[in-house]
């Protein structure tokens, strides 16, 4: 299915109105889901794939639901081991706090009432290893706090270091509160730290190194290793902390400007620098500890929307494996997320996150998605999440049913493929960037894809081999769409400038720039076509 194609080097800028369940494993949210990225009957139902001899079978263990007592930890360890899982990702940093014994991070308020000697991470490692499970410490990297009404009780909590908090371009701390401040609802989710602040970078390095040095973890897992997504069409940009802006000016001689290539790249580089430094520090201390990250499944959109350049992380070897978050009830979406990831990362370094809550009373549906992943031969899967919010009637009953469907035998976690350790600063200025967004053939007759038209030029490229006719529909996310039809009879390539559908006088509203592309073949089957989006900055 996957075809090799050349990818030039650049950066995409975009925004997203999406659930944090889609963007990061741990958090529930009231934000609406986005349209599906892909639809096809190709993978509506797949035949059962034989169980591989090795496979990562993981679950996410959420802090406030399961890490707050020894009894709860005992329960989830037993449930996972009895169902032939082999890995648990335990959340030990939620909102700038610690569910472990730290010398400088505030003890989580979730542990109030527990004995002072209770160390959730140490206990989970002990019990998990006794049952043969790998235990990975899952830490929310850039989250500082999650509530606008209840402040941290510990006066030393990082939330009170206001110079460390993410600011928007108006100078305000970026936090969504549509009821009290609708004009300043700039981001999704909680308070973020400022990635461009060097003190923040040092702090996060020390957070991860303390866990690596003190605990016998099998891995450390980045979550929220990114900037936040903007939540509205007219909201201010983020990343404008005083030190961040000062550093950008000193390093580039430029002013931070919305949608500018240099400012976008600089912010992406701050996230990459954090990942690179922590990866190198981890390997220097314990070479066998695996470093992973949950990321937006479409790497190009993640790069543009939240400056999360995980393709570059894989290219430069600063991540052992990546976990695209393919949280969707659609089998076709999971398939496309997975195959998109496999265009830029080898199968042995891809572990796909699946949204178990979409199949709360339906383990058969989740088993279908696991078979899709096995068909693509990725390293494994991780379920969000192993708890009653995602599994019913009980977690144990659900996981036992899943065991009978797709995990009838115990297997080991596969070793990582050999790769060269390389943390040199290498930049992914993809200019222009050509992304293969879909294919029309005998079985796939339609698909959809989101894309962003920047302050530059965006082209739709159709590489046709004998296909009669395609209907291309371009729809702005928040505004009425434009529809046009391409006649691509015979064997020829077609290029259409989509930039014309953006108001060139209005580059302040992201809603004018984010589109949903749908492609549908007309007429009887015959021929095929590949569709690409090419995008680059003019300035």
Image (cartoon, rainbow, N blue to C red):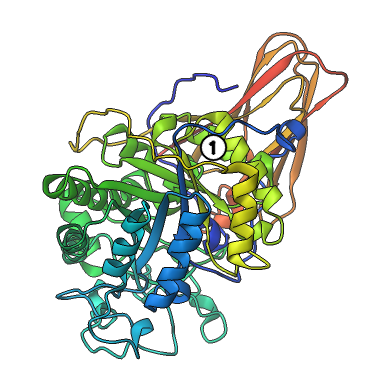
Residue 225 vs 31, above or below: the answer is above
* Residue drawn 57% across the image and 60% down it: 17
- Foreground residue, 105 or 3? 105
Residue 419 visible in rendering: yes
Residue 532 occupies which quadrant of the picture?
Answer: top right
Q: At 26% across and 88% down in the image, what residue appears?
A: 154
Across and down, in percent, residue 207 comes to 21, 65
Q: Position of residue 358 (x, y in %)?
A: 66, 58
Q: Position of residue 30 (x, y in %)?
A: 60, 71
Q: Secondary structure at mark 1?
A: helix
Q: Residue furthest left?
A: 284
Q: In terms of depth relative to the viewer, which is nearer, 35 or 107?
A: 107
The residue at the point 46 percent across, 55 percent down is: 81
Q: In this image, 262 relative to 334: left or right?
A: left
Residue at 71% x, 17% y is: 528
In screen coordinates, is 50 left or right of 166?
right
Quadrant of the frame with the C terminus? top left
Tell me where residue 33 appears, x and y as whole percent. Answer: 64, 59
Left or right of 299 on screen, residue 112: left
Q: Residue furthest right?
A: 523
Q: Which residue in the structure is indicated by mark 1?
A: 338
Q: Looking at the rendering, in which quadrant would you find the N terminus?
A: top right
Whether residue 486 is situated above or below residue 80 in the rendered picture: above
**Mark 1, residues whose alpha carbon is within 10 Å: few (<14), some, or many (≥20)?**
many
How many marks the image carries: the answer is 1
Residue 335 is at least partly visible in this image: no
| Towards the viewer: 25 or 6 | 25
Q: Is residue 185 above or below residue 286?
A: below
């Amino acid at each position: 299915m996957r075809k090799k194609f050349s990818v030039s080097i650049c950066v995409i800028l975009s925004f997203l109105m999406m659930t944090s369940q889609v963007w990061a494993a741990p958090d529930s949210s009231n934000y609406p889901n986005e349209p599906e990225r892909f639809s096809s009957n190709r993978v509506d139902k797949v035949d059962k794939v034989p169980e591989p001899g090795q496979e990562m079978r993981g679950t996410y263990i959420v802090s406030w639901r399961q890490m707050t007592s020894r009894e709860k930890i005992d329960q989830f360890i037993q449930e996972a081991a009895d169902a032939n899982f082999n890995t648990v990702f335990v959340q030990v940093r939620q909102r700038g706090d610690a569910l472990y014994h730290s010398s400088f991070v505030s003890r989580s308020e979730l542990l109030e009432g527990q004995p002072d000697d209770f160390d959730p991470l140490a206990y989970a490692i002990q019990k998990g290893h006794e049952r043969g499970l790998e235990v990975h410490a899952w830490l929310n990297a850039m989250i500082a706090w999650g509530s606008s009404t209840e402040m941290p009780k510990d006066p030393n909590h990082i939330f009170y270091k206001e110079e460390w908090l993410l600011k928007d371009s108006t100078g305000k701390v970026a936090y969504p509160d549509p009821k009290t401040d609708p004009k300043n609802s700039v981001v999704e989710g909680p308070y973020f730290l400022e990635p461009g602040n060097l003190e923040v970078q040092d702090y996060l390095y020390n957070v991860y190194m303390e866990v690596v040095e003190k605990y016998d973890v099998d891995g450390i897992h980045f979550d929220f290793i990114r900037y936040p997504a903007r939540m509205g069409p007219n909201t201010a940009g983020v990343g404008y902390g005083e030190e961040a802006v000062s550093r950008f000016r000193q390093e580039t001689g430029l002013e931070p400007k919305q949608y500018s290539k240099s400012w976008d790249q600089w912010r992406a580089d701050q996230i990459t620098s954090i990942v690179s430094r922590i990866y190198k520090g981890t390997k220097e201390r314990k070479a066998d500890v695996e470093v992973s990250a949950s990321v937006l499944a479409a790497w190009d959109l993640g790069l543009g929307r939240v400056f999360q350049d995980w393709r570059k992380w894989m290219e430069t070897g600063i991540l052992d494996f990546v976990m695209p978050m393919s949280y969707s009830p659609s089998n076709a979406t999971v398939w496309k997320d997975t195959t998109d990831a496999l265009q830029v990362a080898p199968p042995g370094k891809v572990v796909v996150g699946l949204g178990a809550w979409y199949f709360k009373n339906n383990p058969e549906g989740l088993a279908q998605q696991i078979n899709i992943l096995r068909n693509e031969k990725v390293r494994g899967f991780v379920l969000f999440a192993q708890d009653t919010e995602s599994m019913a009637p009980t977690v144990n009953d659900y996981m036992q049913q899943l065991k009978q469907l797709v995990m009838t035998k115990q297997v080991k976690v596969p070793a990582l493929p050999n790769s060269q350790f390389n943390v040199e600063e290498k930049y992914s200025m993809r200019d222009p960037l050509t992304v293969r967004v879909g294919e029309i053939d005998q079985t796939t007759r339609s698909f959809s894809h989101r894309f962003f038209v920047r302050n530059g030029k965006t082209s739709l490229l159709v590489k046709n081999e004998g296909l009669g006719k395609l209907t291309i529909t371009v729809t702005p996310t928040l505004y009425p769409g434009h529809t046009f039809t391409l006649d691509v009879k015979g064997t020829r390539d077609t290029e259409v400038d989509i930039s014309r559908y953006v108001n060139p006088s209005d580059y302040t509203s992201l809603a004018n720039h984010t589109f949903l592309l749908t492609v549908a073949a007309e007429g009887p089957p015959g021929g095929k076509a590949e569709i690409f989006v090419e995008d680059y900055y003019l300035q």
